[in-house]
Image: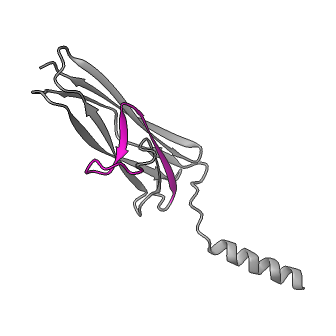
Amino acid sequence: MRKPAVLLFLFALLAGCGDSRAPLDATVTGPEDGTFSIEQSGGGFHIVRALDFQVRSSKGFALPEVEIELFAGGNGILTDIDGNPLDPANPTYFKTKTDDRGIARASFLIALPACVPADLLFTGSVGANVGVTSDLWTGTYTVKAC
């Protein structure tokens, strides 16, 4: 009789622990890809775009407190809305949990060069991974010659 009581006690302890892993049938969706045209008058500057990725169950319910990994690719880094890197040691990677609406937010910062003699094309992306599912946002920036 002692073993079942110990097993029941261990199960109760483990059941109380939150599991931040997404179910295998979870989905993650991010913003639609974007194409941006930027006029410059000289001097380098940067653009910050806020991106929301939402994690949902197969039935469409938001999944809060789920771990999500974000990866920046191309010519940008992951920041807060003010342009501060989320992880200064690794500005192209950020691991966080979704909020109570199942949303994880990061901003994508892309630095643009000073005045260019011809139109210049930049591409950047942010990927979101949750368990076995992922989504990729791609931004294409055309910097107009000045």
- Residue sitting at the far top: 118
Per the image, is 72 magenta? yes
**Left or right of 95 on screen, residue 7:** right
Question: Which residue is located at x 38 percent, y 51 percent?
Answer: 86
**Left or right of 101 on screen, residue 109:** left
Per the image, is 75 magenta? yes
Q: Is residue 131 above or below residue 10?
A: above
Q: Looking at this view, is 8 or 39 the one in front?
A: 39
**Magenta span covers which residues?**
66-87
Q: Is residue 126 above or below residue 2?
A: above
Q: Looking at this view, is 36 or 15 the one in front?
A: 36
Q: Is residue 57 above or below residue 100?
A: above
Question: Which residue is located at x 39 percent, y 42 percent?
Answer: 30
Q: Looking at this view, is 113 or 96 the one in front?
A: 113
Question: Which residue is located at x 19 percent, y 14 percent?
Answer: 118
List x then y, in percent, for residue 115. Answer: 16, 23
Residue 49, image quadrant: top left
List x then y, in percent, for residue 35. Answer: 27, 28
Q: In the rendered view, how is the structure colored?
A: one colour
- Residue sitting at the far left: 41
**Left or right of 24 on screen, residue 120:** left
Question: Which residue is located at x 62 percent, y 71 percent?
Answer: 17
Count how many numbered circles sit on residues in the image.
0
List x then y, in percent, for residue 145. Answer: 15, 18
Q: Looking at this view, is 18 or 47 the one in front?
A: 47
**Left or right of 81 on screen, residue 65:** right
Q: Quadrant of the N terminus?
A: bottom right
List x then y, in percent, for residue 44. Answer: 19, 31
- Residue sitting at the far right: 1
Q: Quadrant of the C terminus?
A: top left
